Amino acid sequence: MNSMTRSSRPRCRPVALLALVVFAFAPSTGCAQSDPTQDPRFEQAVDLFEGWLDAKMDYEKIPGVSVALVHDQDLVWAKGYGYAHPDTEVLATPTTMYSVCSISKLFTSIGVMQQRDAGKLRLDDPVSGILPWYDLEQAHPDGPAVTVGGILTHSSGLPRESAHPYWTGPDFPFPTRDEIIDGLSKQETLYPGRHYFQYSNLGMALAGQIVEQASEMTYDDYIRANILDPLGMSDTYTDIPEQHKGDRFATGYNRLKRDGQRDEAPFFQTHGIAPAAGFSSTVEDLARLASWQFRLLENGGSEILPVNTLREMHRVHWVDPDFDTMWGLGFSVGERGGDRTVGHGGSCPGFRSTFQLKPAKKLAGVVMMNAQASPDDVWARMMSTVGAALESIQSDPGGGTERPSSLAEYEGLYESNWGEAMILRWDDSLVSLGLPSNDPVESMNKLRHVEGDTFRRVRDDGELGEAFIFHRDESGTIESYSVHGNFSRKVG
């Protein structure tokens, strides 16, 4: 079977927690606290997120998703949904490996900054003065040279790609290092330097060569010795580990086609493009990368990087003229949900991922999926549900309301001719959420118990609206509910 169908993946049951991992990477600072994942606010937020994600995965035919949530230096919650390998029904878990593609650029950027701090290079150094074979034509001789800093901010003027069609299927022929070098003489700068933002995989591939040239080590040896091993990231590779193909490394699936199917993506290696797009990892390992950054920002020092260098990388160094694009040194910088974020996303044949930190709140989320879909949606909804619950618990540890077990019988997925709705316990009552939904928090309707099996919707102004009346079968089990006299049948 080489395509995904709706029936080929198990549902993410809203109440059951599957493949859950909760542990800490480093000792927490301050007083010992109870496990936030046991707080009813956290539990109900997980249920809401999972119900939303279940619908997204079904409707968009996404085979597998793994997520992780980090607060300060602790991995608070990590989980897998769906399948890493649909054909053999191997479940996705927090330890499933995915291609993380352009998240690779963060490791390359850290390597460059380490060499800068070691006095081996400067950010304003021309690339032509570091790489002796660099002969890409400067099409704008009156403009500034292509520099190391220009590469890290994607403002160097370089074209997006090397002179090879490696994003073209079905084979995706990524070039070797030598092929990239040979192709440089056939390329030229696209813009004058420091003129426009132009995302460049070619530039970051060259940055990997700059790390090699400055350190006198191979790229893989350098990254492993100076970043991965010190952080305990043993499940992260600068390529895709062939020994884990069909096992821990997930099978990727391409875009959703008009016929509603996804074709299986081929196994690939990015070769010379690896510093820009070649890495593979797990959500647990990238959580370690987030934990390190929070640890460094909190404690100072020079673990992997001096703290001020990390702050420098997080700070905006480039703003495009339209003010829509901001970039640090290797890190994308933006605003999500009212908070400044730093991180990076990744997209390769069959895989999408995102790694985003909210430094001010010491909160980070990681999402990986083995399909061409939107991890940013999943990250945003995880933050607005599970992340928001964690923030509430941290600010008010004793503020949760125990969800009544007597209301559990109403929970589930209901279906009508008009669509689906999920009923969940929320605080001391219920909520209803139509599915699929763009935003589960904004879309859910809170219900208030009136009497018996009757609840009423709570309007935004606090007044009560229409009735939700639940109905039982002959055995007394909830089988449906009605609103305005129209029925939705319980199906899960």
Image (cartoon, rainbow, N blue to C red):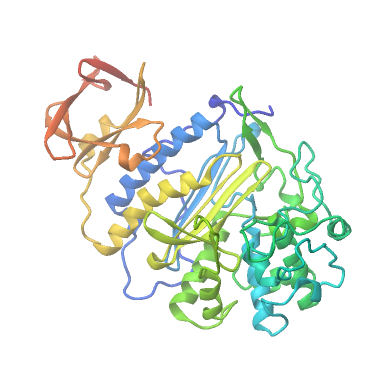
- Above/below status of 407 relative to 345: above
**What residue is drawn where x is 40% and y is 72%?**
28
- Above/below status of 346 relative to 428: below
Q: Where residue 136 sits: x, y (%)?
A: 82, 62
Between 406 and 421, which is closer to the camera in this rendering?
A: 421
Q: Is residue 92 visible?
A: yes
**What residue is drawn where x is 63% and y is 44%?**
351
Between 126 and 100, which is closer to the camera in this rendering?
A: 126
Q: Where residue 229 sits: x, y (%)?
A: 65, 70
Image quarter of residue 305 = bottom right
Q: Where residue 438 sits: x, y (%)?
A: 40, 37
- Image quarter (top left, top right, bottom left or bottom right) of the C terminus: top left
**What residue is drawn where x is 70% and y is 56%?**
201
- Above/below status of 458 relative to 296: above
- Above/below status of 476 relative to 116: above
Q: Is residue 108 visible?
A: no
Q: Where residue 230 sits: x, y (%)?
A: 62, 73
Left or right, 332 with reference to 341? right
Between 317 and 210, which is closer to the camera in this rendering?
A: 317
Left or right, 134 with reference to 402? right
Left or right, 432 with reference to 168? left
**What residue is drawn where x is 12% and y is 33%?**
464
